[in-house]
């Protein structure tokens, strides 16, 4: 299959224990300009994530060793990966299965068999939505631009704990409960970190913490 000539640089991770589906879906996604990494099950995918974080994950639900539910639950607990959007693929079409998949942390639940064009449309839509949430509707290069702060910035141990929880998407109230302090104390720590770094909001603070491996 001849690959389309375009400037798409999005990297996808495709996880499925069916080698035939992997081959067909990978070829179609690459034909549409995506760079595709593959894994046959959840544990293998976690090892790949340690080396290379994709822009989006496409994951089968029913797999040996680690199923899709367990895989997504694990990545949602890791601040380095928890913002990567996930599309579930599953032969289970009942409403309760879809609800479980979405409640687990998937962004889209796509029922097998599906049309390749529908998967590509979901990939495009999910990536676009993810970027809007990150405060940018521009290109991947803009979204992934490194947050710059003064090199002299140093966080206290408590501030490091707070920014780690911020990067996991917790609210100030949830952080106060987690650390056993008042919400006003958490707000003070966040404000101090914004002043130190010169950043403008919690989203920038979270991205800086993840990029600097402070979490």
Image: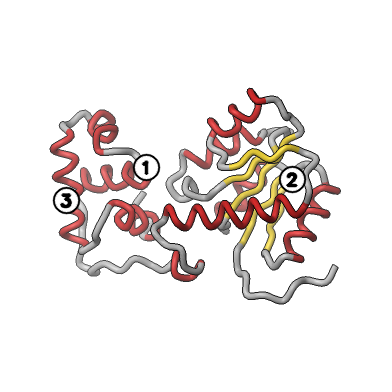
Q: Between disc 3 and disc 1, whose residue precedes? A: 1
The answer to whether 84 is drawn above or below residue 104 in the figure is below
Q: Nearer the viewer, residue 106 or 49?
A: 106
What residue is shown with label 2?
Answer: 40
Percent of width and height locating residue 116 = 77, 52
Q: Are marks 3 and 1 in contact (CB under 8 Å)?
A: no
Percent of width and height locating residue 148 = 30, 69
Real-space Cα distance between discs 3 and 1?
17 Å
What residue is shown with label 3?
Answer: 191
Residue sitting at x 66%, y 48%: 58
Percent of width and height locating residue 122 = 64, 51
Residue sitting at x 36%, y 49%: 215
The answer to whether 94 is drawn above or below residue 150 in the figure is above
Q: Between disc 2 and disc 1, whose residue precedes? A: 2
Q: Is residue 51 visible?
A: no
Residue 67 sits in which quadrant? top right
What residue is shown with label 1?
Answer: 169
Real-space Cα distance between discs 2 and 1?
29 Å
């Amino acid at each position: 299959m001849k690959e389309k000539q375009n400037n798409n640089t999005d990297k996808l991770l495709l996880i499925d224990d069916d080698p035939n589906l992997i081959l067909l879906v990978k070829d179609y996604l690459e034909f549409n300009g995506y760079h595709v990494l593959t894994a046959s099950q959840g544990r293998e995918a976690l090892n790949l994530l340690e080396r290379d974080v994709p822009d989006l994950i496409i994951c089968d639900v029913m797999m040996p060793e680690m199923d899709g539910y367990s895989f997504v639950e694990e990545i949602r607990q890791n601040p380095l990966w928890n913002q990567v959007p996930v599309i579930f693929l599953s032969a289970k079409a009942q409403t309760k299965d879809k609800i479980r998949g979405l409640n687990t942390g998937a962004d889209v639940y796509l029922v097998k068999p599906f049309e390749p064009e529908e998967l590509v449309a979901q990939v495009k839509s999910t990536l676009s939505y993810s970027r809007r949430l990150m405060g940018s509707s521009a290109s991947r290069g803009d979204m992934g631009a490194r947050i710059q702060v003064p090199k002299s910035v140093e966080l206290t141990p408590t501030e490091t704990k707070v920014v780690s929880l911020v990067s996991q998407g917790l609210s100030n109230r949830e952080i106060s409960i987690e650390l056993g302090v008042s919400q006003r104390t958490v707000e003070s720590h966040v404000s101090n970190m914004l002043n130190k770094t010169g950043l403008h909001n919690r989203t920038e603070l979270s991205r800086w913490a993840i990029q600097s491996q402070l979490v």
